[in-house]
Amino acid sequence: MLTFGERLRMARERAGLTQLDVYKAINLSNKSLSRYENNATTPDPETVRALIELYDVSADFILGLSDEMGRARSSTCGTSKSKPKVAEAISSGDKELIKKLESLSPEAKEKAAEYVDMLKTLEEVKSSESVVDFKEKA
């Protein structure tokens, strides 16, 4: 049987979201989602509700009452609160990039991930104050 944290992670992954996307979309603290997904702590009911709506998954699945992920109800107990918008957390340029990545083969996705890691490392090196600019020294 899946744990609460495993169910949260599965639902997040099915929604195609990273932990950072979730932090931005529902204003979680930096490490909260990781702790929830690792079963270190449990979220309060309002956070569970926000995650269910964000992930568009059934409460029964998240709570372990069903093995079917299903979908969240379109309205929650007659309230008029709007769903958190994932679109607010992801820019239009990022959405375009995600669409391009989704169309790649698994091998090409792996290469793209390697390239992104390389670019991140390059940016870290460039922003590091310990890097010596040899052109200036010459």
Image: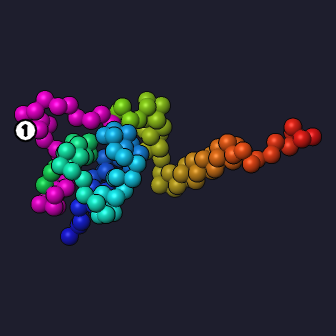
For this orientation, the residue located farthest to the bottom is 1
Count the numbered circles shown.
Answer: 1
Query: At 34% across and 58% down in the image, what residue appears?
Result: 35
User: Where is 4 relative to 127, above or below?
Assistant: below
For the point 74% across and 48% down, the residue is: 130
Q: Nearer the viewer, residue 30 or 74?
A: 30
Magenta stretch: residue 75 in it? yes
Question: Residue 73 lies in what quarter of the image?
Answer: top left
Q: Position of residue 37 (x, y in %)?
A: 32, 59
Residue 18 in view (yes/no) = no
Name the residue that disc number 1 marks. Answer: 77
Quadrant where the N terminus sits is bottom left
Q: Which residues are magenta?
A: 61-86
User: How far across and how far down the image is residue 60, in percent?
Assistant: 13, 55
Please rate how many residues cluster around mark 1, counting C-alpha atoms within 10 Å: few if below 14, some from 14 to 19, many from 20.
few
Coordinates of residue 53 in the picture (x, y in percent): 21, 42
Give percent across and percent down for residue 122: 67, 47
User: What SS does tag 1 mark?
Assistant: loop
Residue at horizontal 17 percent and vertical 31 percent from the top: 81
Q: Amino acid at mark 1?
A: Cys
What type of secondary structure mainly makes up the magenta span? loop
Queried whether the magenta region covers residue 34, the answer comes back as no
